[in-house]
Image: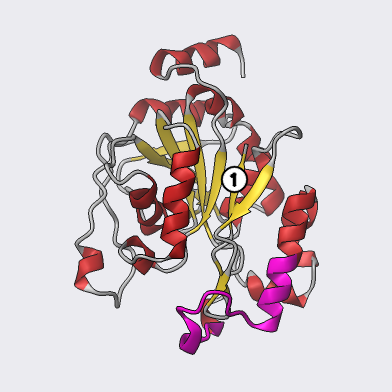
Amino acid sequence: MNLNDLSKISDNFRTTEKMPVLFLGHGSPMNAIEENVFVQGFRNISKEIPKPNAIICISAHWFTKGTFVTAMDMPKTIHDFYGFPKELFDVQYPAKGSPELAKETAELLAPVLVEEDHNWGLDHGAWSVLRHLYPNADIPVIQLSIDYTKPPQYHFDLAKKLSKLREKGILIIGSGNIVHNLRLIDWKNIDTVGAGWDWAIEAREKTNNWLLDGDFQKLIDYQKQGSFLQQAVPTPDHFLPMIYNLGLKEKSEELSLFNDSLIGGSLSMTSIRIG
C-alpha cells in the first residue's frame, strides 16, 4: 500500500487502534434465533473489542469463480437455506453497505481483479452471527467472496493485503466452521455440546494445537494432514474463511479460542480472536 491508498482510506474512516480479527464458527442457521452458549459467546466477544467503523465479512456461503465484493448501499438479507421455520425466514438484518469500502477493498487487492457486486447481499454466514454481535445493525457491512478456483495458500496471501484496513477501524470477520461435514451429522446429538465422532475430536485437537502454536502452514496444507482432517473438511468452503483470518495475524499478536466445542458429531463451533 502506498501513501495515496492510505489517504483514501483515511478520508472515509477515522484512524483507530488496530482492530482485532475474528473467525466465527457459525453452525446452523438456527443459531440466529436460538439462545445457547454459542450466541452468548458471540455477544461476549463483541463487548471485548472496540466498536468498528465498518465490517468486512468473508463467508463460507459466498463461494464464487473469481473474487467479488458487495458494493450496494443497502445489502439485502439473503435466506440461503430451506427446511427451517418461518421465524428464521422472517429475520432481517438491515445494515447499510459501504460502496466506498468496497472500492477501496478492491483497490487494495490489486492486481487481483475484484469485481463490484450489486446483486448478492448478506448471506446467513454473515447475518446469523452479526445480529448477535451488533443487534442494532448500525455498522456498515460488506462481503468479500471466496474464489473457489484458488488454493488455500492464495487466500492466505491475499488476506495480507487487507491488513491496513484494521488501522481504520475495519473489523474483518471470517465465518464458517473448521470441522464441517453435514453428511456425517449425528442427529441424535445435534444439540449436544461436546458431541463428536472420533475423527472430529482428533481434528479439533490437532487444528487447535496448530492454531495456538502458530503452525499455520499445516492448516494451509490441510489436505496433506491425514484422513481425520479429510473427513472434517470434505469441501473447502467453510474452512477457507479461517485461512483469511490467519493471513491477517502479525507475529506479535495473540491468538485465542472461544466457543470451542464440537456439536452434532461432525461440526465444530470453534471461533478465533486475533489481536
Q: Is residue 114 left or right of residue 253?
A: left
Residue at image x 60%, y 30%? Answer: 163
Determine the image quadrant of residue 249: top right
Question: Helix, strand, or loop for circle 1?
Answer: strand
Q: How many marks?
A: 1
Determine the image quadrant of residue 6: top right
Query: What's the amino acid at mark 1?
Result: Arg
Q: Kindly identify which residue carries mark 1.
A: 273
Q: Residue 89: x, y in percent?
A: 23, 65
Q: Residue 5: x, y in percent?
A: 53, 16
Q: Is residue 179 left or right of residue 208?
A: left
Residue at image x 71%, y 34%? Answer: 250
Badge 1 density bin: few <14, some 14–19, many ≥20, Cα 10 Å: some
Q: Which residues are magenta?
A: 184-205
Determine the image quadrant of residue 167: top right
The stretch drawn in magenta includes residue 188: yes
Q: Is residue 124 above or below residue 130?
A: below
Q: Quadrant of the N terminus?
A: top right
Q: Is residue 98 above or below residue 47?
A: above
Q: How is the image coloured?
A: secondary structure
| Residue 155 shows in the view | no
Residue at image x 33%, y 50%? Answer: 131
The stretch drawn in magenta includes residue 232: no
Of residues 138 and 157, which is closer to you in this image?
A: 138
Q: Residue 174: x, y in percent?
A: 52, 49
Q: Is residue 52 left or right of residue 261?
A: left
| Residue 264 shows in the view | yes
Q: Residue furthest bottom?
A: 188
Q: Quadrant of the C terminus?
A: top right
